[in-house]
Amino acid sequence: MSAALKLEGLTKSFGKTAVIMGVDLEIAKGERHAIIGPNGAGKSTLFNLITGRFPQSSGAVYLHGRNLLGLAPYQINRLGLSRSFQITNIFLRMSVFENVRCALLWSKGYKYSFWHMVGRARDLSEGAEAILEDINLIERRDAPAGMLSYAEQRALEIGITIAGGADVIMLDEPTAGMSHSETEYIVGLIRKVSENKTLVMVEHDMGVVFGLADRISVLVYGEIIATGTPEEVRANPKVQEAYLGTALEAEH
Amino acid sequence: MNSSNSEKASLPQRNEFWKLVFPWVLTALFLLFLPVIFASNSALTIMNQMAITIIFALAYNMLLGQGGMLSFGHAVYMGVGGFMCVHVMNYVEINSAPLSLPFLPIFGGLFGLGLATLVGTFSTRSAGTVFAMISLGVGELIAACSLIIVAFFGGEEGVSADRTYMRPFFEIEFFTQIEVYYLTSVWLLISALLMYLFSRTPIGRMANAVRDNPERAEFLGYSARWVRYYSFCASGFFCGIAGALFAINFEILTEENLNLATSGSILLVTFLGGVGVFFGPIIGAVLFTLLQTVLGLYTELWQLYLGALFLATVMFFPQGFAGVLVSHAPAARNGRLGSLFIPYVKMAAPSAVCLWSVAGLAELLFHARHAALGEEEMVYFGINMLSTSVIPWTVFGGLAVISFGICRTVAPSVLEAWDKAITPKGMAQ
């Protein structure tokens, strides 16, 4: 199996502060991969490096074998990588439907067209409806995105992320700040939408991580100290020492 | 079975189509018959000016309302388009080139587009303050050039041309104001329709997305910068059309068409009308032109009133006139629009008296300070009064205070009626 996403010696420093100190990681096609670690370990920074939000200091990111060095976020997205954000990042003044439709435009080949009418494009409206159906927001179709509840906004965030049909999906703390029942809803949603796709996610909720992930990487102070299946990571003494100890004991 | 199904499916689409086309047909008829009511030459001039301002304001709102870009120097795109058209007219006159007047706006549009494609390459790199500052700088730069490059801009006198020397268009030579009115109206309709359709295209939708959240748009495969650039160019094109129509109507362009005052006033017009709704700038342009021309006939203080209106809009109705209209939609849906009529009248009557008396005070003050020495008599709404006498001052002051007091007592009941009207039936309390 070839790697969908491959990181090689990736580092990032802000001034003299090194945040990511040489990360090597391979994520196979179709894998559900979770990145965990204590606060301030650099998980979100790692996400931002992979998706081109920040430039890396050294090292390389490969998406399906292609080096992403120097590409802007929109170019990386066009290569089939899509991400969500830790802090909800949607188009607040547009309707839920419009949000999803905008997320479909590029992948449906409309590009910067000023000769198509979006209202008359069947593929757009049907595609957007299907995604609203998937994320359970069909009843909120015409509400402004800013008026949705927090959990609905998170669901919309995921909907926008998957709409473009990217085969590598990166979710940054999809269940952050959610109640138990809302978390269950989002986990079910993630499981559904990530079928046959490569999923990379940062998550704090261990229940979610161990329930969803095929493999887990543990990031501590900008370095990956362990990668493996949930069982392997659970059993790894380094991990227990650094981070998981208390959480795992509580679970047993 | 199958055919009846497809018929059912196409029926709502046909309805949709008519819903889209109907307002435009209505507008066209309205424009066609407007001169029947307002036939005088001065009325036609005002209407032409209105049409030009509408196109300009709609084009400006492609940036401000739809793209989230605040431009402080947008007059240059209209101005340069107009200047070029004057030169084109003169060229046609000298060389008797085969060009009719109705096609001139295409040239204006292309010149506006050309300038925008150049300036846009560096100004649309980001929105917000950077864009605003660059637009201000470029605006100042080109306005200053107009006094330096005399060959093109004609210095302080500007450049002029004669529209009647163009090739006749089906025997029409555009000597009369009514012919120019129909030419302007056709272009108004074309431009407004194209701008409306632009907002429905993928790039128009993404302009909204970039306005709301440029970063998210980037992660959906769109370069925020290119999206802004295309909106900017499209806006430049329609500004150029407005400039060409200005050149056709007035046959002269001067530095005034490029300067910051003109750029500022289009921001005012657009904001007054409402940036959030497509037709908002149309209301703003109509209102502004009326205030400028009609109110300007009656009082020298029209700019003061316009400024006050603008301030009030920004402070109390940031969504503009169109926003206020649109905010009545929930009440209309609830079928409670009628219940607002009486509260509104209750509020409007004292407000009108209040405004009337405050304006009276302003006029008295202006007259007392600026009238020729020894001239004490002034006329306000047909009433003769002495600006030096105490009586009008006391009456206006008293009326203002009393009516303001009434407004304040009535306000809570109006708000209550409003809350009731926008609450869906069955969800009371």
Image (cartoon, coloured by chain):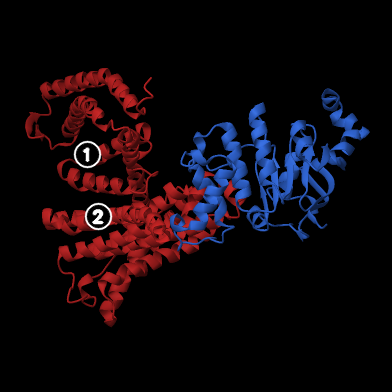
Left or right relative to A142: residue B238: left
Chain label for disc 1: B
Q: Which residue is at 59% across, 57% downward?
A: A107
Give the amino acid type for the residue marked by disc 2 in the picture.
Thr
Mark in front: 2 vs 1: 2
Most distant residue in the right direction? A237
**Do the residues at discs 2 and 1 belong to one chain?**
yes
Could you say which is closer to the camera, residue B402 or residue B385?
B402
Q: Position of residue B374 (x, y in %)?
A: 9, 33
Chain coloured red here: B
Image colour for chain A is blue
In which quadrant of the rendered view does residue A216 lie? top right
Q: Which residue is at 51% across, 55% downward?
A: A124
Q: Which residue is at 34% across, 44% downward?
A: B268
Circle 2 Cα neighbour tier, 10 Å, few/some/many (<14 / 14–19 / ≥20): few
Label 2: which residue?
B27
Circle 1 Cα neighbour tier, 10 Å, few/some/many (<14 / 14–19 / ≥20): some
- For the N terminus of chain B, the image quarter is bottom left
Chain label for disc 2: B
Asked whether residue A86 appears in the rendered view, the answer is: no
Left or right relative to B146: residue B301: left
Asked whether residue A149 appears in the rendered view, the answer is: yes
Q: Which residue is at 74% across, 31% downward?
A: A205
Label 1: which residue?
B301
- For the C terminus of chain B, the image quarter is top left
Q: Position of residue B129 (x, y in %)?
A: 51, 45
Circle on res. B233: none
Q: Position of residue A243 (x, y in %)?
A: 85, 30
Give the amino acid type for the residue marked by disc 1 in the picture.
Leu
Q: Are marks 2 and 1 in contact (CB under 8 Å)?
A: no
Earlier in the chain: of badge 2 and badge 1, it is 2
